[in-house]
Amino acid sequence: MRTDGHWGDDISCRTLCDFIRRPVIIWRSVEPDQDPHCFVPLEHTAIGVATPVYLRLEEHVAGSEHYTAFLWTPAPPAAEAGPPPKKRTPAEARELHGLDAIGDWGKLGLTRAEYQALLDLDLSNLTSLQARAAFQETVPDLRLTFVDAQFFRDLKKTKRREDAKEKFHKQLAVIEKVKAGVEGDQEVVKAVPGVGTAFVRAVRKQFETIAESCWRAEFSKMFTVFGLHSSGRAWHQEPPPNESWAAKAQEWMRVPSWVFCPECGRRELKTEVAWQWRRNPESCVQRPCPHGCDLPPQELQQELEEPLESKSLKAYVTPQLEHWQAWVQHIAPEAAPETLLHQVVPAEDLLALGLVNLHLDFATRRGGKASVTSRQKQTVIRASWKPSLPTEALRSEAGRRAYEWLCSNNKTYEFFVEKHKAVLRSQAAGEAHLWIPTAELLLGLPGLEVAARPWLYPYTGCGDTDIAQRLSKPSAA
């Protein structure tokens, strides 16, 4: 072990390699980019072809180093040649989804807005090529590879264009009827004569697909720990009666019991949604805020140019993934948009960003024959300032960049940083101590949550307990 280039288990790995007569290749977990260390049996020339033993040295916990074994998996066999690929429709070729993939517009590979713009053009005095060029000027980003010249020749006829317009408006009316919750295909056909039940069914199917995909995304935000059900059953189907309570609970969570705003993400408990959402999916699961969404955090940080007409300021921010994206990009510019903060900043540096420690005494209790325990508070919550500044505790460049972002984009955090510095100066001079009095903690430090858990508050507007103080303007006196 005192020899340069050797380490404690060198002789053990060498002995193992010679005993089992197979090569041993070892990587290091703390240095994944370092070339692996390879042990070859002493009598390797007489062995022939042998599968090596792959190990990784785990060194994260000092005094508990150990090896993790990896199993070699052969490459999967090449897939057999199947039937020729199915020819894609114009909507599939343009990757149109949802309501844009059906109707007369979907058959041409156009969206509803593009199709309406095409019908509004006066093509009566134009040739087919001129008509294509005129439509291309209306929608310059569209490549007209799906709309043939025959369609433009038909639109030059006034009667053909008027019939297409009438059918288009009827199809839009069907979409609105289904969206409004009209039940029964025949009822919709009676309300909008001239449209067949096949189109009504296609619209209903698209609405259900839209709602299910939106609910899947919402479910993944709230209950990703559960994952997909192991039985492979559809995520919205009822579990069999003989399944465990845990499995039933997982399935229940996949049934909507609240609505969420598609704009700001605000969630509201609605127990009746679980019974009605399949019948009227979009309006049940997605429900925009009735009086407008709360302001985004970036807008809450800006001073208002004009006084508010209403005394009620909608200023409660519902955290969304995009609120952290700019922060992550500042720390790691090359990171993908879906990268999370804890994936670019080490856990110890995230904790080091905090300015105060929260303290609470509790007792772990179990009620009756319950399989889970609960924690019972025994004291009021207390807080103390950390003995050092984040600039002294941060170890990585990512942590330092995260600290720079907070000081520039969260004025509440910047305020507590200055207060922390003042406390440390007073404490060094023997004029103060690090413990925060309870009265000051509960009544005199609005926004303390930002100082305790700053990684949850990328912007000033994300704060909770300091909304009134932060957004109220001093009266002109």
Image (spheres, rainbow, N blue to C red):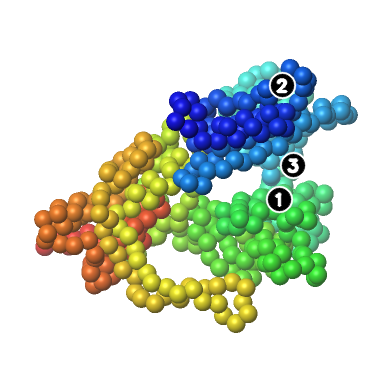
For the residue pair 290 and 250, the one nearer the viewer reads as 250
Give the mark nearer the N terminus: 3 vs 2: 2
- Report if residue 81 is visible in the image: yes
Q: Residue at x 34, y 49 (%)?
A: 353
Regarding mark 1 in the picture, which secondary structure is present there? helix
Residue 43: image x %, image y %? 71, 21
- Report if residue 25 is visible in the image: no
* Front disc: 2 or 1: 2
Q: Quadrant of residue 346?
A: top left
Tag shown at residue 232: none
* Front disc: 3 or 2: 2
Q: CA distance from mark 3 to mark 2?
A: 74 Å
Q: Residue furthest bottom?
A: 368
Q: Amino acid at mark 1?
A: Thr
The quadrant in which the C terminus is found is bottom left
Residue 319's place in the image compared with 465, above or below, is above
Q: Residue at x 55, y 25 (%)?
A: 35
Q: Residue at x 64, y 32 (%)?
A: 15
Give the mark nearer the N terminus: 3 vs 1: 3
Regarding mark 3 in the picture, which secondary structure is present there? helix
Residue 242: image x %, image y %? 81, 70
Q: Amino acid at mark 3?
A: Gly
Tag shown at residue 103: 3
Tag shown at residue 209: 1
* Front disc: 3 or 1: 1
Q: CA distance from mark 3 to mark 1?
A: 16 Å
Residue 4: image x %, image y %? 45, 25
Q: Amino acid at mark 2?
A: Glu
Q: CA distance from mark 2 to mark 1?
A: 64 Å
For the residue pair 415 and 225, the one nearer the viewer reads as 225
Q: Mark 2 highlights which residue? A: 43
